[in-house]
Image (cartoon, rainbow, N blue to C red):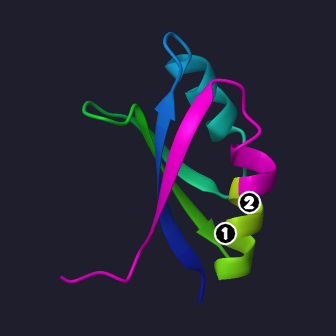
Amino acid sequence: MSTKAYILIETSVGSSKTVSDKLRKISSVVRVDAVTGPYDIIAVINAPDLTAVGDLITSQIHVIDGIVRTITCLSMGSTN
């Protein structure tokens, strides 16, 4: 079973579009939404396990120019 996480991303002024485009090119990123509020983007990722989530964030997401800060929220499953 894969691990799903929501990555709340704050970007530098004027870089949201570029950051969103780069996020969409990462295979584990399944959705990228621009949002209002304290964060500019929420990305949804699926990875094989928690270690893979951490590796993905540190090696592929944090290195994107224009990202100021991220918060990772792990999904605990659906409550339908």
Q: Tag 2: residue type? A: Leu
| CA separation in Å, label 2 and label 1 | 5 Å
- Answer with the quarter of the image where residue 63 lies: top right
Mark 2 near mark 1, Cβ–Cβ under 8 Å?
A: yes
Which residue lies at the image location 53% right of the left edge and 20% below the top edge?
Answer: 12
Asked whether residue 68 is drawn in magenta, I would say yes
The total number of labels drawn is 2
Which residue lies at the image location 72% right of the left edge and 26% below the top edge?
Answer: 65
* Residue closest to the far left: 80
**Which quarter shows the N terminus?**
bottom right
Which element carries disc 2, helix, strand or loop? helix
What x and y, as percent, mark residue 2?
60, 81
Q: Which mark is residue 34?
A: none
The foreground one among 33 and 71 is 71
Asked whether residue 37 is drawn in magenta, I would say no
What x and y, as percent, mark residue 76?
38, 83
Compared with 77, 54 (above or below) is above
The foreground one among 14 and 21 is 14
**What residue does disc 1 label?**
53
